[in-house]
Amino acid sequence: MRARSFSHAGITVSDFNRAVQFYWDVFRCPLVGVADQPPDRVRSFFGVDADAPSCKVGWIRVPGGAVLEIFEFQPHQPPVDIPWNRIGLTHIAFDVRNTEKWYDYLVAKGVEVVSRPERSPRGHSFFFAKDMDGNLIELMDLGYKYHVLAWLGPLGGFLFRRGMYRRYYE
C-alpha cells in the first residue's frame, strides 16, 4: 500500500469570504467547493461546544492539483502562535518561480512578509509570508531541482530507501 499523491492541507480561518478572496487575489487559487456542516456534526465530529455552532468548509484548488481546505467555525476561537519546535503542522508551501519577484509582488499587495528570500545550502530559494489570519506560507523556488524531482523523484526514492537513507526505513 502507498499514497498516490499529496491531497490537501486544512486550515481554520476567521472569515471564510476573506480567505477565499485572499487566496484568489494573491495566488490565483479558485474556490471549487463549499459545504455547510449541520450543528449536530459540528458538536460531535469537530467538538465545538456551543448552542448553535456552525462550520463552513471550502476547498481551494492550488495549481498543480493540491487543495487547501478552509474551515470557518462559529463561534471561533482566537488564533495561537505555533512555535517551530512544537510537534505539529507549522506552515503550507507553494512552489513558485523567482522568489525575488514574488517577494516584491506580495509586498506591493500588502501581504505580511516574514523574511526576505534566501538561498538554502542545497540551492533552492525560499521565504515566508502570512495569510490574513497569520498562517505561515512558504514560497519556494526549487530551481532545476523541480524537474529532477518531477522526473527522477520516484527513482530517487527507490534508490535512497535502499542506500543512504536505509536506516530510516529499518
Image (cartoon, rainbow, N blue to C red):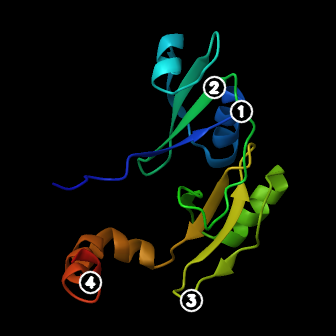
Query: Residue at image x 63%, y 66%?
Result: 84
Q: CA distance from mark 2 to mark 3?
A: 41 Å
Q: Which residue is mark 4?
A: 167
Q: Nearer the viewer, mark 1 or mark 3?
A: 1
What residue would you read off at disc 1? 77
Question: What whole-number distance in Å separates the C-alpha atoms at marks 1 and 2?
Answer: 8 Å
Q: Position of residue 68 (x, y in %)?
A: 52, 42
Q: Nearer the viewer, mark 2 or mark 3?
A: 2
Q: In the displayed image of the protein, which residue is found farthest to the front?
A: 49
Query: On the image, which quarter does residue 158 sit in?
Result: bottom left
Q: Residue at x 76, y 57 (%)?
A: 106
Q: Nearer the viewer, residue 81 or 25?
A: 81
Tag shown at residue 73:
2
Query: Which element is circle 2 on?
Result: strand
Residue at 83 percent across and 55 percent down: it is 108
Q: Secondary structure at mark 1?
A: loop
* Residue 8 position (above or below residue 71): below
- The foreground one among 75 and 133 is 75
Under circle 4, the secondary element is: helix
- So how many labels did they put on this image? 4
Gap between marks 2 and 4, in whole Å? 43 Å
First along the sequence among labels 1 and 4: 1
Residue found at x 43% / y 47%: 66
Q: Is 66 left or right of 82, judged from the image as shown?
A: left
Classed neighbour count for the residue bearing mark 3: other residues with Cα under 10 Å, few (<14), some (14–19), many (≥20): few
Q: Are marks 1 and 3 in contact (CB under 8 Å)?
A: no
**Kind of element beneath mark 3:** loop
Inspect the image, locate mark 3, and give the three-letter code of the amino acid beneath it: Pro
For disc 3, the marked residue is: 121
Percent coordinates x, y for residue 130 in the rendering: 72, 54
| Residue type, label 2 | Phe
Which one is closest to the eye, mark 3 or mark 4?
Answer: 4
